[in-house]
Image (cartoon, rainbow, N blue to C red):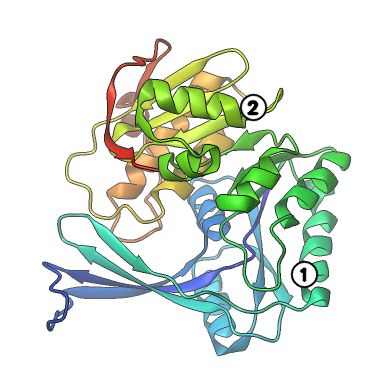
Amino acid sequence: MIVTVTPNPSVDRTLVVDEFREGGVNRALDSHVEPSGKGVNVTRALITNGIASTAVLPLGGSEGDQLASLLKAERVPFVPVPIASPVRVNISLVRTSGSATKINERGPLLSREEVADLMLTVVGLVDDASWVVASGSLPQGVEPGFYAELAERVHEAGAKYALDTSGLALRLGAATGPDLLKPNVDELADVVDKPIRTFGDAVAAASELRQDNTSVLVSLGPDGALLVTAESALHAEAPVGRPRNTIGAGDNLLAGYLAAAERSSTAALREAVAYGSAAVRAPGSLAQAVTDADRRAVRVSTAVDHQRALQHPSAS
């Protein structure tokens, strides 16, 4: 089983618009409400593809009740950690072209006791887990070192640990030597404090971030994904045609990697990009089940073109 922890989950309301005019009246063509948060999305993707996973998340307020109801409706296993503050509600504006704009609330304020309960709840599930995945931003009251402490406790219990976050939490968490780090190109550039304009820049930054036993999976948006390990650097991409929605694609990418992580680096990267490709074709953050056609469409290269420019480079 794969356990995910999302300290700052959300109820996501997505509005689909043809065009967005700032300062004007915009009429939604469609709308839907989903359970969200990075770890929550990882669990949803795994469950959709028949892989056992449980999401751990704090829940509070009527918004927390709504989030729980949405998870139950999707039959997503979860373990709630009760908190006093309400969870956040995020707004996503998705254009029919596929581009997305997110407006995220800051999130709840957790007490010291609630943070401890969250940590203990995750640790209590480690014995039944092959991986523990820590994902997303940290809400108020949770120190940046939370993920680093969790990494140590997960490894002590014998499970593998994956981390997908940003900023100081990523920097501190990376120093503990997690088994997998999954930044996107902007998060990677920020944590190494260098611009990333080419594949070579991305490989160098990932190599700088990783520890001896750490693999780094970098989501590159339209350029696919890069996997940097102690042995190699691999690149994979797949044609997706016209994307419908990029929200949650990185979470699906991570889910796909974990689904095949016990096979080989090449197989895990192929599955990751297949999951990510399926995600951008879906109208919401929950993708359809990955097909063999999705897997066959993925091209994996063992010889990374270091001089190739990224379509959307980081300017950090």
The quadrant of the rendering that contains the C terminus is: top left
> At which x and y percent is residue 250?
44, 46
Residue at point 43%, 28% (across, down): 202
Q: Secondary structure at mark 1?
A: helix
- Residue at 71% from the left image edge and 81% from the top image edge: 83
Give the left or right position of residue 27, taking residue 57 as reference: left
Evaluate whether residue 132 shows in this view.
Answer: no
Q: Which of the 4 image quadrants contains residue 120? A: bottom right
- Residue carrying label 2: 262
The location of residue 197, given as percent across then percent down, is 33, 31
Of residues 37 and 138, the one drawn nearer to the viewer in this rendering: 138
- N-term-proximal mark, 2 vs 1: 1
Mark 2 vs mark 1, CA separation in Å: 31 Å
Query: Is residue 230 at all visible to an observer of this figure?
Result: yes
Relative side of 29 to 248, left or right: left
**Up-down relation of residue 44 to residue 58 (above or below):** above
The amino acid type, in three-letter code, at marker 1 is: Val
For residue 31, which quarter of the picture?
bottom left
Question: Which residue type carries mark 2?
Answer: Glu
Q: Residues within 10 Å of mark 2 (few under 14, many from 20)?
A: few
Q: Residue at x 11, y 67 (%)?
A: 19
Q: Residues within 10 Å of mark 1 (few under 14, many from 20)?
A: many
Per the rendering, the mark at residue 115 is 1
Rendered residue at 51%/42% (across/down): 183
Tell me residue 201's x, y (percent). Answer: 41, 25
The image shows residue 245, relative to residue 184, as above or below, that is below
